[in-house]
Image (cartoon, grey):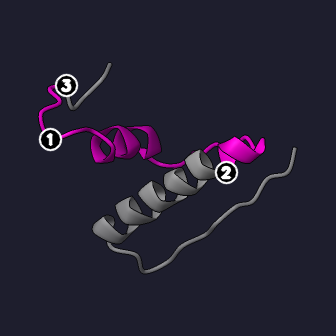
Amino acid sequence: MRKITLKTKGLSTKQYSTLVLELNLVAKNWSRFGAKITVEGKSAERIISWGTRKHDDIRPETQN
């Protein structure tokens, strides 16, 4: 297993959310080549859940 740490400075909240969603897209697309990539970070799970929902999806926004 290899680990990469990204340290960001000066990102707005929206830019951080977009970065997390972009990394999630990379992880999904690379999975078909056998690479298992996980995105971990501050609120990453919540951002991915919110950012990948469909228009008519009624999932709760907060999960306990």
Q: Amino acid at mark 2?
A: Trp
Classed neighbour count for the residue bearing mark 1: other residues with Cα under 10 Å, few (<14), some (14–19), many (≥20): few
Classed neighbour count for the residue bearing mark 2: other residues with Cα under 10 Å, few (<14), some (14–19), many (≥20): few
**Main structural element of the magenta stretch: helix, strand or loop?**
loop
Tell me the quarter of the image containing the N terminus: top right
SS assignment at label 1: loop
60 shown above or below 46: above
Q: Amino acid at mark 1?
A: His
Q: Amino acid at mark 3?
A: Pro
Which badge, 3 or 1, is on the more N-terminal residue? 1
User: What number is the disc on residue 55?
Assistant: 1
Q: Nearer the viewer, residue 13 or 31?
A: 31
Classed neighbour count for the residue bearing mark 3: other residues with Cα under 10 Å, few (<14), some (14–19), many (≥20): few
Q: How many marks?
A: 3
Instruction: Tell whether 5 sits left or right of 16.
Output: right
Q: Nearer the viewer, residue 11 or 30?
A: 30
In this figure, which residue is indicated by the disc labeled 3?
60
Mark 3 or 1: in front is 1
Residue 4 position, x and y percent, is 75, 59
- Please say whether residue 44 is visible from this viewpoint: yes
Q: Which residue appears at 21% of the width and 32% of the height?
A: 61
Q: Which residue appears at 50% of the width and 54% of the height?
A: 25
Residue 55 position, x and y percent, is 14, 41
Residue 20 position, x and y percent, is 46, 57
User: What number is the disc on residue 30?
Assistant: 2
